[in-house]
Image (cartoon, grey):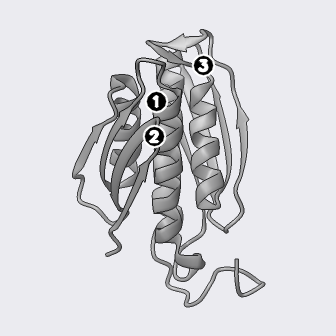
Amino acid sequence: MTIVEEKRETKETKIMLKLNPDGTGSITVDSGVPFFDHMLTSMATHGGFDLTCTAKGDLHVDCHHTIEDIGIVLGDAVKQVMAGGRGIQRFAHAVVPMDESIATVALDCGGRGYLVFTGTFGNRAIGTIPSDIFEHFFYSLCNRAGITAHIAFTGKNDHHMCEAMFKAFGIALGQALSRSKKKGVPSTKGTF
């Protein structure tokens, strides 16, 4: 069992996060942004993680710094779990439908951060959150963790598309970080 804790404190945010990828469903998320809390809870639930995340951010400005920095801190935690790739599956994918929407996520937890984000929300905001922040969240997470991610979604309802995307990412991440029967690093190079 790998339990990691990460913290980040800047002039804009203060974030504390604990992640157990082999969890039992213990999830507590409080970012001050309720819809984002719902998305992180969905991701952790379907990924099979235990996740505790508390954030205090400059929400009087907007939610950008808070969501971005949670992505950074979660990325740092995932990188610790990846531990240079030794003993993890590394590759995984998931497809999640949600009513009229569908999201596909393919991951390589191989040490190189890269994001391909394909999909468009119908509105400039989902609730009080600017729609473009979700791509930036995944960029921050993937870049920091060293994950190559291809995320694609389509549909009509922004809430459904966003939630399907977070669920698919959680499922794929849970599979990619799961323990491999193979010893060593899953790479022809022998290292990431």
Task: Check disc 2 and report its element: helix, strand or loop.
Answer: helix
Q: Please identify the quarter of the rendering in which residue 119 is found.
A: top right
Position of 187 relative to 112 (above/below): below
Q: Is there CB contact under 8 Å for labels 3 and 1?
A: no
Q: Could you say which is closer to the camera, residue 62 or residue 139?
A: 62
- 3 or 1: mark nearer the eye: 1
Graded by Cα atoms within 10 Å as few (under 14), some (14 to 19) or many (20 or more), the crowding at tag 1 reads many
* Residue 92 visible within the image: no
Name the residue beneath numbered marker 3.
155
Position of 167 relative to 171 (above/below): above
Q: Is there CB contact under 8 Å for labels 2 and 1?
A: yes
The amino acid sitting under disc 1 is Glu
- 3 or 2: mark nearer the eye: 2
> As drawn, which residue projects farthest toward the bottom?
183
Which residue is at a point 32% across and 28% down the rendered structure image? Answer: 32
Which numbered marker is on residue 167? 2
Measured from the top left, where is residue 187 in percent x and y? 71, 80
Q: Earlier in the sequence, mark 3 or mark 1?
A: 3
Which residue is at a point 38% across and 43% down the rendered structure image? Answer: 14
Q: Could you say which is closer to the camera, residue 95 or residue 120?
A: 120
Graded by Cα atoms within 10 Å as few (under 14), some (14 to 19) or many (20 or more), the crowding at tag 3 reads many
